[in-house]
């Protein structure tokens, strides 16, 4: 079941501001370092002078994502170029309920993800990406959680480096973050740095719509809409 999350953002500072949106990284097994991408970016004029409100919408149908990684992965740079995604469901905590919780990466003749199907052994609240045998030197791949932003684009939200012949289990954490800055969708950010002093829209308690204000003092006000 897909859920539409909406964030209405007002800039109450005296100058135009760049804002970018990102998510709390998912919890992964099957890899080491977890990377985080911006999922949306826009400039917003002061509300007092323009009356402008930025409405960010994200359709949280969960997507498994795989991507060909660009060389020299670094903060501020795009994480990759060819991106494949497939809708996927989380494993149910109810015994006997089968969900489409697993997809598999293919690399020959090109990068792709198979439609999701049920697989045993995946923890409740998670989904699985199975990687094939491949050469990790010539085929450097990202794998993780993808989202569909308000432009209709599917973007890797968080990911790890995919290793050959592994099961990557991903448990999404549905919280959205907003920070000032010009990181465009699909570019790598430092989550630890970017999340300091940011706005947090926590959807884990069932809230799906938020009103967020960036104040002149550089602090945020967040309320359920």
Image (cartoon, rainbow, N blue to C red):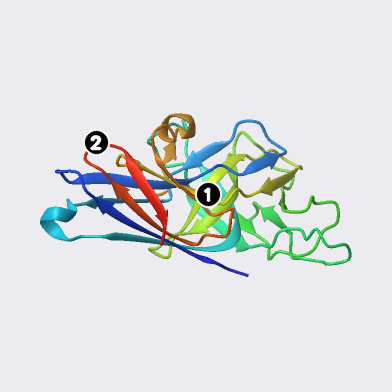
Q: Which residue is mark 2?
A: 217
Residue at which label 1 appears: 175
Q: Which residue is depicted at the point 22% across and 44% down?
A: 17
Disc 1, SS: strand
85 up-or-down from 31: above or below: below
Which of the two residues, 50 or 213, is positioned nearer the viewer here? Answer: 213
Q: Looking at the image, which residue is at 40% across and 63% down?
A: 150
- Answer few, some or many: residues within 10 Å of disc 2's Cα (few below 14, many 20 plus, some between 14 and 19): few
The residue depicted at 27 percent of the width and 36 percent of the height is: 218
1 displayed left or right of 196? right
Work out whether residue 78 or residue 199 is closer to the camera in this orientation and state it.
199
Image location (x, y in percent) of residue 156:
51, 50
Q: Where does the image place residue 119, in percent across and percent down from the top left?
A: 82, 59
Judge whether residue 155 can be spotted in this image. Answer: yes
Where is residue 22? Give x, y as percent: 45, 46
Q: Is residue 61 above or below residue 12?
A: below
Q: Quadrant of the N terminus?
A: bottom right
């Amino acid at each position: 079941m897909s859920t539409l999350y909406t964030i209405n953002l007002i800039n109450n500072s005296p100058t135009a501001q760049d804002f970018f949106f990102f998510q709390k990284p998912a919890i992964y097994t099957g890899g080491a370092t977890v990377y985080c991408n911006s999922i949306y970016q826009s400039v917003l004029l002061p509300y007092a002078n323009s009356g402008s409100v930025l409405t960010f919408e994200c359709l949280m149908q969960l997507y498994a994502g795989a991507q060909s990684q660009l060389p020299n992965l670094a903060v501020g740079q795009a994480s990759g170029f060819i991106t494949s995604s497939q809708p996927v469901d989380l494993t149910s905590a109810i015994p006997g309920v089968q969900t489409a919780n697993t997809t598999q990466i293919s690399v020959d003749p090109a990068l792709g993800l198979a439609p999701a199907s049920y697989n045993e052994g995946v923890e409740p609240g998670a989904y699985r990406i199975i990687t094939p045998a491949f050469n990790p030197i010539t085929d450097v791949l990202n794998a993780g959680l993808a989202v569909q932003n308000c432009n209709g684009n599917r973007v890797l939200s968080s990911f790890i480096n995919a290793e050959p012949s592994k099961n990557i289990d991903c448990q999404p954490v549905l919280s959205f973050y907003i920070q000032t800055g010009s990181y465009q969708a699909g570019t790598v950010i430092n989550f630890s740095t970017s999340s300091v002093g940011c706005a947090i829209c926590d959807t884990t308690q069932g809230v799906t719509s938020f009103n967020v204000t960036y104040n002149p003092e550089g602090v945020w006000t967040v309320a359920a809409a």
